[in-house]
Amino acid sequence: MQRILTRTRLRAGSEAAYERVHTSVPPALAARLRAAGVQDWTIWRDGQDLVHLVEVEDYRAMRKALADDPVNAEWQAVVNPLLEAADDYSGGDDGIPRVWSLADQVDA
């Protein structure tokens, strides 16, 4: 299982709309995320900054599976206008590089 950290940034003034659409994502999207290997996806917001923790079997495979998925495309059409930079699920994104872990150091 991979734990991937990513970040995105909201357009100014879209904070409430972003939180409103994330009150509950569409069940079809949740099912597609699970089918693509996502165990959990947690989002924190600090002002306009969003931090995502994705727990997934294979992050790149998940993004590839969702890139052309019509359910994901419908969701991105809702979310991307709220972001400063849209995510089209292309490319070889690996998230934010990890620097250190207490558990890795202590349990090694």
Image: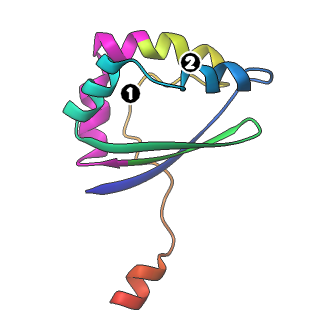
Residue that sits furthest to the right in the current view: 13
Q: Nearer the viewer, residue 95 or 38?
A: 38
Q: Is residue 26 above or below residue 74?
A: below
Sequence-earlier tag: 2 or 1: 2
Question: Which amino acid does the dot numbered 1 rest on?
Answer: Ser
Judging from the image, what secondary structure is the residue with disc 1 in? Answer: loop
Q: Residue at x 39, y 27 (%)?
A: 89
Q: Report the residue that reaches farthest toward the left.
A: 35
- Using the numbered discs, state the Cα–Cα distance from disc 2 to disc 1 in whole angstroms: 14 Å
Residue 90: % across, % down: 38, 27
**Magenta segment boundaries in residue numbering:** 55-74
Say if 70 sits above or below 108 in the image: above
For the N terminus, the image quarter is bottom left
In the foreground, 35 or 59:
35
Looking at this view, is 19 or 7 the one in front? Answer: 19
Q: Secondary structure at mark 2?
A: helix
Q: How many marks?
A: 2
What's the residue at 24%, 27% (across, down)? 65
Residue visible at 62% across and 21% down?
20
Pointer 2: what residue?
A: 80
Residue 99 spot, x, y in % from top left = 51, 70
How packed mark 2 is, by other alpha carbons closer than 10 Å (few <14, some 14-19, many 20 or more), is some
Contact, mark 2 vs mark 1 (Cβ under 8 Å): no
Q: Left or right of 59: which side holds 14?
A: right
Tell me the mark number nearer the camera, choosing from 2 and 1. 2
State yes or no: residue 56 in magenta.
yes
The residue to which callout 1 is attached is 90
Looking at the rendering, which quadrant does residue 92 occupy? top left
**Crowding at label 1, few (<14), some or many (≥20) Cα neighbours within 10 Å?**
few
The residue type indicated by label 2 comes to Asn
State the predominant SS element of the stretch in magenta: helix
Q: Does the magenta portion include 71? A: yes
